[in-house]
Image: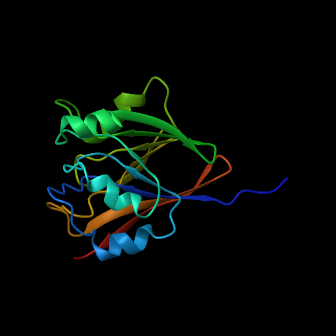
Amino acid sequence: MEKRKPVKIGVVSDTHLHRPRPLPEPLANGLKGVDLIVHAGDWIHPDTAGLFEAFAPVVGVAGNNDGPDIVRRFGRRLTLEQAGVRIGVVHGDGGRLTTEERAWEAFKDDPPDVIVFGHSHIPYKGQRGNTLMFNPGSPTDKRFQPRYSFGILVLDEGRIVSAEHVFFDK
């Protein structure tokens, strides 16, 4: 039986692009060669997905700043499987709890292996039980963070090989 190659996933959130424009060069370079792109919401402009689709297939969810067209296309919550790893995706917005806690609450009844979330623009990687909690930060709207960021997940045969943030300056 032939062994499959690991799956490399680009992870982004909170792009907040009000009009389509080229992606930042470090992000574009970092997405070259990924097998899939996961976006955790706040795309803003409906054509933003097309910018990412130039690199790989795109899945994701809508965030609290996305309009009805984006909500219809992506929905507010997603569970998918890649390389035998279950991934839950949610934006993480809401009125109570921290962003990480809200992301966990969305999947607590059937926790996936990884929960990808956004909303806070704060890069985060931590464990909650057997679940990796991963927020890529934002590659275009760093707010109070020192650097822009996105993430790369590498999955293989039911395990998370790596989950790393990529930081850059404009």
Tell me: residue 21, above or below residue 104: below
Image quarter in which the C terminus is found:
bottom left
Residue 107 percent coordinates (x, y):
42, 29
Q: Nearer the viewer, residue 133 or 86?
A: 86
The answer to whether residue 70 is visible is yes
Color theme of the render: rainbow
Q: Is residue 54 above or below residue 76?
A: below
Q: In the rendered image, which quarter is residue 23 located in?
A: bottom left
Which residue shows up at 45% across the image and 23% down it? 109
For the question of whether residue 98 can be seen, the reply is: no
In percent of the image, x 18 and y 54: which residue is there?
16
133 vs 66, left or right, is right
Q: Is residue 104 above or below residue 46?
A: above
Q: Answer with left or right where residue 103 lies relative to residue 2.
A: left
Residue 29: image location, x then y, percent: 40, 75
Q: Position of residue 157 (x, y in %)?
A: 68, 50
